[in-house]
Amino acid sequence: VNKAEKRSTRIFYNLLGYLVAVASVALATWLKFLAQPTIIPADVPILYLLAIVPTAIFFGFGPALSVCVLSFLAYDYYFIPPIHQITFDITETPIAVIFLVVGVLFSYLASNLREKNRIAADEITARKKTEAELITYRDHLEELVQQRTADLGKTNLALKEEIGEHKKDKEALRQSEQRWATTLASIGDGVVATNVSGRVSFMNTVAEALTGWKTDEANQKPISEVFNIINETTRQKAENPVDKVLQQGIICSLANHTILIRKDGSEISIDDSGAPIKNLEGITTGVVLVFRDITERRKAEKVLRQMEDRNKLLADILERAPQPFGIGLPDGQLGIVNKAFCELTGYSAEELRTLDWAKVLTPPEYLTMETEKLNELVRTGQPVRYEKEYIRKDNSRVPIELLVSLALSSNGQVEYYYSFLTDITERKRLEQERQALLDKITDAQKQTSFDLEAMTKLQKLGAISIGEGDLSSILTEIVEVAVSISGADYGNIQIIDHETSDLKIVAYQGYPNWWLDFWSTVSKGKGTCGTALERGERVIVEDIEQSPIFVGTPSLDIQLKAGIHAVQSTPLISRNGKILGMFSTQYKTAHKPDDRTLNLLDLLARQAADIIESKEAEEELKRRTTELEASNKELEAFSYSVSHDLRAPLRSIAGFSNILYEDYSDKLDEEGKQHLKKIEASSDLMGQLMDDLLKLSRVTRSELNIEKFNLSEMAHEVVQELAKNEPSRQVKVTIESDLNVQGDKNLLNLVLQNLLGNAWKYSSKTTKPRIDMGTVKHNDKQAYFVRDNGVGFDMAYANKLFQPFQRLHKATEFAGTGIGLATVQRIIRRHGGEVWAESTVGEGATFYFTLN
Amino acid sequence: LENKKILLVEDNHNDIDLTKRALKKSNILNELIVAEDGVEGLKYFFGEDGKGGCSVEDLPVVVLLDINLPRINGLDLLRRLRNHEKTKLLPVIILTSSNEEKDIITSYNLGANSFVRKPVKFDEFAEAIRVLGLFWLVINQPAPNGKH
């Protein structure tokens, strides 16, 4: 059928060629007419040439030659003059001739080329055909090989026997082969058979599934292509068992781990073996390759190996870990311990394995606790953590912390305990240190808050001004503070009665009345306070029953009855060292006050002493003020009396002397008259004396009225007054100008009257009298002076100068009452200043004074 | 001038004599009434128990009043005189030994018209009396009697 078809096709093809030849010439001619003469000159047959080439290429020499001849005729007939005639004059139509020649040449070349192509194509087809035939043949051969391979591939004795028995029974053989093929197809392993050249001839379904190749695809493919295996670890191409079997002719199974690369590139781990297929003559005709997917197994193996590795690693880590680790068995034996555990306990692993950790390692006091903990562990299954101690081999103890976990067997029984231990010696030490530190801090805090409290109380006491409250209530507060900050049960302050020198309680806290009665007055030597008074220093009785101060005295019973067992008494000493009183605190238990408390008591005693002292000073001041006021009043009354009552008789004396003189002068002789004059003059002097005394007393009594004024001007006025009273005298007076002072104007006027008056008076017998007034520096203060060049005075009597009624000159020489300078001194003192004098007899005197 | 009386309240007889002599020396011849203490002074003006006493015509032209007096002293007397209608404007001169500031101030506060300290020297005393008499008896124009 095929050949007939091909022939008819060829005929049709040839016919088509000639038709195309005619058509192409007709087309070229038509085109030439269309193009003529505008585009292509009439004598150029290019379009015909173009018609030749494709015809030649597609349809061969024959049609091409037809085109050539037809073209020549058409060209010659239509385009070469004489047109519409066929002329064959070669000389006249060279182009036509050339065209013909070229056309024939083209036809030949093109058809030749086509022919060559066709031959080549035919050859390829033939080759393909041959190949297909070869393959078919090979298939057939390989099928046979497979069958043979099946015969020998497995040591199926039964089959062998059957083969042996029914060697010549072809039916049996066929059946056997069929059965064998079924078996192969149904077994779990992949089976691939190859021919002797190693090309695949058979694959069972498992093999197909494993390799990813279908039998059809794989058939006759080299085994290495279908069964592409590599080494699992090196990933290098592995030796194909088929090749090995073919080379060695023996069964070989590959123990090395092999990976099959499937058709789609995925990988599976396989286990494979190969066996030669031999024919009856024992010649190897092929190889049967059996393999199975061991991916899962390999995975499992890998996991197992990893686990083993990990277990080994863990065990190694545990062994080397610095943390002690131990496994205890329920029977009390130690299972496994690591090196750190041995080091911790001082026992070797062997020793530990034989001893009972609960009895030998654990001190008995921990057993109950540990049992409880382990019970809790068993009950809850949760790891327990606790601290205990181990007794080491050398009997020393080491504090440890355990974290014990439980391992249960599959039936829920305790298999073993495993414990991680921590040597907490350092931690314990740190904890102890920390605790000690904390205790210290707590103590310090307590101390601080105590101090703060004490300070606050002291400050509060300090804030109490002496003016506030009476002495007893202030001292009571001090006692209360002392009792509270010294932890005493009782406290009291006694003050010395200045008349009897006994101690008398003025402030107290917490005594029964009969106790206070007993101790209300204490003389030297009685009790602790009396002893402290006697010794002038603090006395501490830590236990009165042991103290000679109390033992054998009635005081002991009183103290014990009040529950007092310890006492301290601190004298209250004034700033100038005088004992003012006693500060005692009592304690209900034998007690020794610490330094801090004693310091605090000292502080309080100091404060109490100050308060008492200032109170006493205050009272003394009050008393003196009262006295002074009284004496001032007396003085005032006296002055009054002087000014009135003494003056009246004086006036009578003077008055009646005068009357006597006037009315009875005729009855008196000269001497009598002189006497009367003397009486009168004396009365007058006495009047002056009394006036001066009154001035002096007024200076003391009158209020100071301090103001600022110019002392120089005041001095000038005083001098003017003096000059007016004695206009005959010529005295050179120099007064420093603008001496501005602050003071009582009236009193300072009196000062100037006295000082300038004295200078005036005592220079009256000097030939060139002069008075100077000015200032000098005296002890960094400004001192004013009044200087004269008069008679002066003997410095030996300088101390008498300022005393009232003391005169250094005879009344006959210089008049005076002797009260002036005393007045000056009082005035200057009232101004807070000083007055003094310097002099040389006959050369004058200088009086200095300062003002505050 | 002779009708005008002078009242001297003074307990010291010597002083009374000296005052009389000084007045005489100064030619002051007015009648001198002497009360020897405050009680007597009051009696002169207001009689016994404050009833009666001198008539307006018998009121002295000036009172010379000592401070230091028995029973009722000079300052008390002055206070009573000033509290009484009849004697409210009567010229009163405090004539005393004292020169105490306190006495001077109290005197003026109570309404004394003048304060004179008796000098010890008789000459000076006589001079003071003379000047006083001249001033109060001659120069001074007193408030009209009963017109106040």
Image: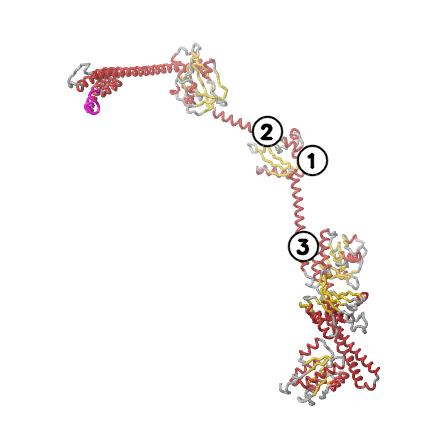
**Disc 1 to disc 2, C-alpha distance:** 29 Å
- Residue A563 found in image quarter: bottom right
Q: Which numbered disc, 1 or 2, marks the residue closer to the eye?
A: 2
Does the magenta portion include A39? yes
Sequence-earlier tag: 1 or 3 = 1
Q: Is residue A716 left or right of residue A415?
A: right
Instruction: Estimate the x, y position of residue A489 in percent, counting from the top left.
Output: 71, 56
Instruction: Estimate the x, y position of residue A233 in percent, counting from the top left.
Output: 50, 23
Disc 1 to disc 3: CB gap under 8 Å: no
Residue position for label 1: A396
> What amino acid is found at the position of numbered circle 3 in the picture?
Met
Q: Is residue A849 above or below residue A308?
A: below
Q: Is residue B100 above or below residue A168?
A: below
Sequence-earlier tag: 2 or 3 = 2
Quick one: A734 or A45, which is closer to the camera?
Answer: A734
Which portion, as a residue range, is magenta? A29-44
Quick one: A818 or A618, which is closer to the camera?
Answer: A818
- Residue B94 found in image quarter: bottom right
Q: Could you tell me if residue A822 is visible in this image?
A: no
**Disc 2 to disc 3, C-alpha distance:** 67 Å
